[in-house]
């Protein structure tokens, strides 16, 4: 076995060897135009999977231009089609996107919001429609885009909120709720959807001279993100999670400051406290990075450590099957925002792009779609929604420039 010094030296040698081969593999991948861990065969198989998914979605579009008769789902499908990377191959993709655009524009409200057909959530719907229109960047849509952006900014709880003025010491300050009237109780899912849309349209701040207002909104968002991350109130730059000493402060994110949406289904609560789980932690991490928090900041590193300790793509970590595709979609965006090719897990460094592509390919149905067969909550029984989630996540993992 050797003495402790020899064992320690052996560990260092193994670690250096592991780092060496990661660097070699990353170099070979870069030379071939692929990302580390993604072989040419896996990339080709993934591109074919995306093509099958696109064919399925094109076949599901209704005569009114919608998918599932909902502006939010239609907008997400439009984004999946636009980013699919095969628009030059299939001209009918642009036609479908245009029909979808006309559908969502029919649901613009006087206050700038986009309304749903069967559900009242104005935030999700507005955020997704805003992203879809901003992605297309049609001159005739720019006023609609600006108004939708202002609507989302106005939803954020703050001191001068017209309906729900909120003190900065309040745990919900800086968060964004459903936007559907009544008492606004922000949660991380609603907040991260809105922040994603605000991030993707940030260039409008400069164009409209609203940089100061947008900067204040992001600063408020950081305060809300602090209230939903499982870190001590007195944590500072030197804090790191110690789950053995205090498992409640694990660095992950929860649904909202006073509860976890699925807590009633969990049996391993810590003194009744909400539990961190995968989708919220990925959403919180992504939102911190979008807000300008540096990747080496302790809050970002704590979230990355949580994802590494709980790493799995087989399910939504901690929850299981519920919101699985939402998690995979959010995880891909979070890892893209962080920028590393690998994630440090209990089993060593993992090539997350490779793992994500393999997992999604294994879940795709022969007809080309994806669907959550284990849990239909949050509309994951609707193939149009889950297929859009999957295609976007796969394209993020491939990280190839879209054509057309």
Image (cartoon, helix red, strand yellow):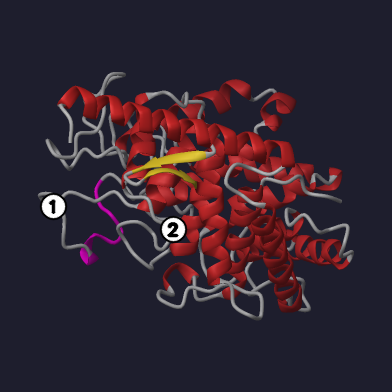
Q: Residue at x 67, y 43 (%)?
A: 147
Camera-nearest label, 2 or 1: 2
Q: Which residue has dot 1 on it?
A: 272
Work out whether residue 364 can be spotted: yes
| 37 horizontally vs 169: left or right | right
Residue identified by numbered label 2: 313
Q: Residue at x 66, y 53 (%)?
A: 395
Residue, x 81% and y 59% (percent of image)?
Answer: 86
Query: Does 230 appear above or below 291?
Result: below
Residue 170: percent from left, percent from top: 29, 34
Quadrant of the rendered image containing residue 384: bottom right
Magenta-tinted stretch: 258-265
Q: Position of residue 60 (x, y in %)?
A: 71, 78
Check if residue 264 falls in the magenta segment.
yes
- The secondary structure type at the circle numbered 2 is loop
How many marks can you see?
A: 2
Q: Is residue 159 among the parts visible in the rendering?
A: no
Is residue 282 on the magenta stretch? no
């Amino acid at each position: 076995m050797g003495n402790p010094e020899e064992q320690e030296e052996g560990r260092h040698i193994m670690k250096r060897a592991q780092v060496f081969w990661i660097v070699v593999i990353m170099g070979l991948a870069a030379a071939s135009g692929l990302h580390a861990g993604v072989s040419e065969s896996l990339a080709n198989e993934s591109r074919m999977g995306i093509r099958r998914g696109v064919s399925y979605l094109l076949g599901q579009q209704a005569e009114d231009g919608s998918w599932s008769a909902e502006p939010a789902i239609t907008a997400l499908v439009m984004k999946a089609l636009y980013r699919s990377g095969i628009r030059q191959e299939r001209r009918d993709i642009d036609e479908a996107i245009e029909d979808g655009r006309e559908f969502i524009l029919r649901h613009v409200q006087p206050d700038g919001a986009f309304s749903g057909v069967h559900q009242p959530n104005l935030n999700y719907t507005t955020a997704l429609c805003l992203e879809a229109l901003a992605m297309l960047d049609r001159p005739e849509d720019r006023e609609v885009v600006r108004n939708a952006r202002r609507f989302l900014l106005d939803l954020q709880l703050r001191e001068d909120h017209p309906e729900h003025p909120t003190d900065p010491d309040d745990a919900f300050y800086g968060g964004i709720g459903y936007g559907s009237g009544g008492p606004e109780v922000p949660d991380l899912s609603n907040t991260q959807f809105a922040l994603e849309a605000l991030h993707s349209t940030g260039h409008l701040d400069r164009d409209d001279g609203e940089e100061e207002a947008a900067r204040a909104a992001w600063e408020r968002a950081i305060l809300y993100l602090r209230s939903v991350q499982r870190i001590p109130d007195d944590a500072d730059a030197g804090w790191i999670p110690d789950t053995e000493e205090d498992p409640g402060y694990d660095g992950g994110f929860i649904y909202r400051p006073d509860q976890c949406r699925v807590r009633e289904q969990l049996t391993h609560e810590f003194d009744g406290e909400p539990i961190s789980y995968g989708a919220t932690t990925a959403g919180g991490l992504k939102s911190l990075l979008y807000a300008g928090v540096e990747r080496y900041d302790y809050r970002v590193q704590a979230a990355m450590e949580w994802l590494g300790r709980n790493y799995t793509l087989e399910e939504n970590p901690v929850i299981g099957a519920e919101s699985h595709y939402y998690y995979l979609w959010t995880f891909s965006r979070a890892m893209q925002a962080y920028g590393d090719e690998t994630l440090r897990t209990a089993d060593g460094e993992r090539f997350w792009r490779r793992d994500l592509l393999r997992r999604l390919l294994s879940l795709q149905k022969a007809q080309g779609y994806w669907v959550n067969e284990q849990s239909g909550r949050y509309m994951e029984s609707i193939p149009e929604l889950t297929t859009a989630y999957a295609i976007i996540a796969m394209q993020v993992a491939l990280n190839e420039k879209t054509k057309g």
